[in-house]
Amino acid sequence: MRYFWLNILILAGPVILSFDQKVSYYKRWPAVFLSILVVGLFYVGWDIYAARRGDWGFNSKYLMGKSVFGLPLEEVLFFLTVPFSCIFIYECVRAYLPETIVFFPPAAAVFFAVLFGISAYIFRGRNYTCLVFSVSGIFFLLAGWFGGGMLSSSHFWIAIFISYLPFIVTNGILTGLPVVIYNSRAILGIRITSIPLEDFFYSFSMLGFYFLVFLLFRPWVSF
């Protein structure tokens, strides 16, 4: 049950504060849920694939015992609560902080895409490492092509940075208890506290894709 209550805790603050007049997050819910649907389908599919392949598993001691597509219900909820809350952080940053331009030319996006691609090849024997580096590289390519300057916006990088703070707390709980158990053959074995290094790139690429798709829908769907 602890994983379930962690999801509720993640969701509670952004739901309560969605009606703040300056942010008016509730007006963006259609774009938020479209982003969650589009990006979440990929990441849920990745989770199902990785769990079946044995890259990671879940400790039943901390679960309710209900599953969806072979994943614990709490894990599926994670792909709703986390993006909902992190896009809320992004909207707060947009509402309360002035935007400045970060030097991030298109060539930089290509450079990072190539760097992550090479890293994925080098660590192709580590399933999770290889895949998370590959997806991170794809994110930089797509964000550089379709992001409309997202990577050059201080709002994006500040929101990512702030999102890492609750990530370290929640993921620290999930990997410290542990709720999520990693196959040592699928990762490099480098951990920050109890969190595998790969999870930091996983979080970056996932939130990056959520932000990207949200920004594409944001001008067109709102209350």
Image: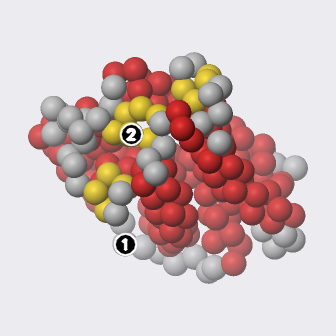
Q: Nearer the viewer, residue 118 or 62?
A: 62
Q: Position of residue 9 (x, y in %)?
A: 69, 56
Colouring mode (rainbow / by chain / secondary structure / one colour): secondary structure
For the point 46% across and 63% down, the residue is 168
Q: Which residue does the numbered mark 1 point to in the structure image?
A: 103
Any part of residue 68 in sight: yes
Residue 181: which numbered mark, if any?
2
For the point 54% across and 20% down, the residue is 70
Q: Is residue 210 left or right of residue 77?
A: left
Please say if 44 is above or below 172.
above
Q: Nearer the viewer, residue 188 or 106?
A: 188
Q: Is residue 94 left or right of residue 26?
A: left
Q: Position of residue 51 (x, y in %)?
A: 41, 26
Q: Position of residue 137 (x, y in %)?
A: 31, 45
Which residue type does callout 2 highlight?
Answer: Ile
Real-space CA distance between mark 1 and mark 2, rounded to the nearest whole angstrom: 39 Å
Q: Position of residue 180 (x, y in %)?
A: 44, 41
| Direction left: furthest residue | 122
Q: Dot 1 lies on which element? A: loop
Label 2 CA crowd tier, 10 Å (few <14, some 14–19, many 20+): some
Q: Is residue 53 left or right of residue 46?
A: left
Q: Which quarter of the picture shows residue 64?
A: top right
Judge depth for marks 1 and 2 and give the one in front. Answer: 2
Label 1 CA crowd tier, 10 Å (few <14, some 14–19, many 20+): few
Image quarter hosting the N terminus: top right
